[in-house]
Amino acid sequence: MNLPFRHPPFSRLRAFALGECGEAARRRVARHLERCARCREEVSRVRAIAAAARAREVPPAGALERVLARRARGERVVLPAAAPAGAGRARWVPRAAAIAVVLAGALYVLGRTGELEAERSELHLVPAAPRMGEPIRVEYRATSRLADEPRLVLRARFRTPETAPQEERYAVLGLLERTGDGTFAGTVRLPDSTVYAVLAVEDTLARFVDHHGERWEVLVHGADGRPLFDALYQRSSDVELRDTRLATETAEELTRLYPGRPDGWQRLLYEATSRAPRAAADSIRAEHRARYLPLVARSIEQADSPDVGLLASAVFYAEAANDTAAAARWKALLYERYPRHQATLQRRVFDLYEEYRSRPAELPGALERMYQEVGASGQLAFSAFNLAVQWGDGDAAARWAPRLIEAAPWWMWWMKARVARSLARFAAHRRLAAQYLRSEIESYAAVLEQAAAAVHAGPTPNVFQRPLTQTAAEYSEALQLRLGELLTLHGTTLLELGDTAAALDTLSRAFDAGWDPERLRTIGELHLARGDTAAAARAFARVVVDPTTSAAADSLRARLGAAGSGPAWEALLSDARAVMKQYVWDGAVDRAPLLPRLRLKDVDGRARVVELRQGTPMLVAFWSRYCPASFAQLDELARVASRLEAEGVPVVTLSTEGPATLRQFMEGKGYRFPVFIDAERDAAAAFDTPALPTYFVLDDAGRIRFAHHDVSRVIRQVAALREAK
Amino acid sequence: MRHELPSHNWVRGAVHQADDAALAAAARAGSAEALAALYERHAAAVFTAALRLLGSRADAEDVLQDVFVGLPDALARYEERGAFGAWIRRVAVRTSLMALRRRSRRAHEPLAAAGGLAAAPPEPDRSVAARRAIAALPDPLRVVFVLREVEGYSHAEIAELLGITRAASALRLHRAWKLVRRSV
């Protein structure tokens, strides 16, 4: 790497990594690390090695018995005097304890207003392994973006033992007061019954969030010093979407510490098989059946009165491991002991599906009879509603809709809109759909209003809470976007109901809710269907000027007739361009990547150097097929990349995999966009981002002008850059 | 490092409420229960120190057993001014160093050749690779590395303990890091 500076000697990097540097040296090294990927890697390696060396080992089983036996035989050992105490010893010991839970270290934070900064922000907790309800002292060393604030807000996403897999709850834990130069501290408590929490620090207006890649976490421990079962279980579930490997490792730890708990084994089996090839998954199941299922069986047999959670998850686990006999035995026990419990009702719905497999037409009747017998259960209503929609039975769908909405827990905030969307397909039930949509729109509008008024005031209504990693501005944008979708759907539904005045009112609100050419096209179509050509032309003009949808220009203009040409049309186009430009440049930044060129490897393992200053706009995209959000955008990334290349815009994409599997994946999917491997971590140093996917659009001079997570914006941004030239 | 789980003190059986000083007094007087309670609390620290210093689980268990078999008698020398946990770790360090000297006199146990490390396939998990690399260091380098980076001794203390100069201690530390970094 041709960098115009010298690397610090290893001894200094080591001292820095282990917190033994003086303040002046620490600053010098920190400044160097901002620019040097190699030394950052070295620091991270030193920390990893020290943490591994300091990790406690478990003494061999039976050693205590052997000690006591030797003592009982009268054996004597003369020990040497204790080695001298060291002055420096206490220095890292509390620190090391904290590091176990809170991973400190250099991390690149993608600034929420677009700053990329190499910052050493650290969060330390004392005690590192808190008991439930115990106060926790939090010390924070701020990133430069937060260092000058008088006080900061500590927020948490947290889980309790009852937290369902998709459920997310958020809370402000407290304020951190400034204690010195860029350092903050406070004492907080986790909300009642919390077993697992992920922490983030932000300013009091939530303009900048330091979430550290969601790696600051707290696992609540029991009186015996072990992390609670629920702490590990909830952590495994929480990290699953962002880090599958950590989810698996946590499940392994869970079964090691709590071998009698079927829910732990079920979690591990799920993690191990869900991404494994079929043959491997089968052998994993066989191993669970032979080795681990008996542990669960023993714990159930030993329990005087096995609780409902134990039994229900044991049935799931036995089924997942293909042990039908054990599954049937435990299911019978579950039904007998807990006949009306939700877990039993859920299984009974599955039983009905099995029972009526050969005569499906009778299944809806059976589900209805079960409802008359037991009332609304979430599983029952969900299954029955979906079945009705799938089979086109509008009356049944309308009957089950209110039951489903009633049975859905609050955190299924999307349920009402989803039910409405399905119901809107049935002409006879659009009125009900519109009613659900209206109440949903009202709650969104209320949340938006509240979000604008005060970011931290009071508990957020449970409809839709601000994610830990979002700033207040991003949260508002996400709400706007969703509100826009709902308004469009509501408007369409009202129009189909013949309620023209209400439909127009709704659609005019949707029109202003954000730039989305597909939605604009729908709105134009609706106006056209109503015969309002002028309004349709206003919407279509926006579709036509957008480079992602401009191909439809001719057909849209033809449908507008006279309104699609002439000076009035030209005026609409120029107006639309101005509005689009404003939307596009609203999200612009201007900063240089931290390296002028990237040394990468291609899928054939050949070294390649990519200059970031190309004299033309350029796209740099980070993706991973293991990140669901990223995977979902790959097809569109392929389309965007091929279009950009046809226009002479260079595209560089970076994946997290090795060359062989990557090439296989690309060939299998038929993707042709250029993909590279960041073997030297140059790209990570220049662009590193806490979330995938991330897209960087660079200008002619190689400066980053747009950075975001939505591939559909790229074409517009490249066009805007070219136009600005 | 990111995937490391928090360390947990897995105390088997009942939770002992008595403090270390009371347990130590009872163990000195011959109580097997008190000795067992002290074991539950401190065995992991003793075993870890011994394992890191010796690089062998079998040798580390020998040290672990010896420390606790000899503990009731050694407690006569324990001054209650300092923390018991810190004291027993220092005893464990001394006992491990003695075991190491015995082992090198026996000399039938071939020391892991440092050169062999580079040839080993890279370990996917950093922390496992790191622990293996430390265990495979030549004894003189590993002892200095562990005393400095795990037990937190200064170079002056290490020099005194091992009968070498401070410069030699610093040089060994540097060489140890070089070898460990190469394989992580």
Image: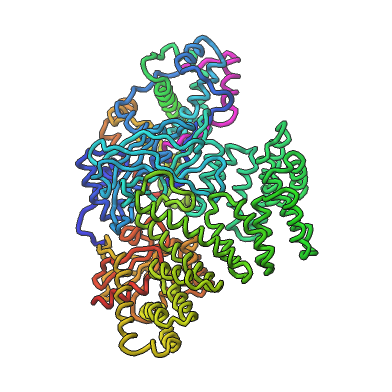
Question: Measured from the top left, where is residue A624 in percent x and y?
Answer: 46, 62
Q: Which residues are magenta?
A: A52-78
Residue A76 highlighted magenta (yes or no): yes
Residue A676 appearing in the image: no
Above or below, comparing residue A716 to residue B125 in the picture: below
Give the side of residue A429 with respect to residue A558, left or right. Answer: right
Question: Measured from the top left, where is residue A82 in percent x and y?
Answer: 39, 20
Which of A355 and A591 lies nearest the eye of the viewer? A355
Question: Which residue extends farthest top?
Answer: B29
Which of B68 and A293 lies nearest the eye of the viewer? A293
Residue B100 appearing in the image: yes
Which of A73 and A364 lies nearest the eye of the viewer? A364
Give the side of residue A93 with respect to residue A6, left or right. Answer: right
Above or below, comparing residue A689 to residue B183 in the picture: below
Above or below, comparing residue A474 to residue B146 in the picture: below
- Residue at position x 55%, y 60% from top? A436
Give the side of residue B97 with respect to residue A685, left or right. Answer: right
Residue A648 highlighted magenta (yes or no): no
Question: Measured from the top left, where is residue B72 in percent x and y?
Answer: 49, 14
Q: On the rendered image, what quadrant is the C terminus of chain A found in?
A: bottom left
Residue A218 falls in image quadrant: top left
How many numbered marks appear?
0
- Name the colouring of the figure: rainbow
Q: On the rendered image, what quadrant is the N terminus of chain A found in?
A: bottom left
Which of A224 and A9 lies nearest the eye of the viewer? A224
Question: Measured from the top left, where is residue A534 in percent x and y?
Answer: 39, 81
- Residue at position x 47%, y 75% from top? A522
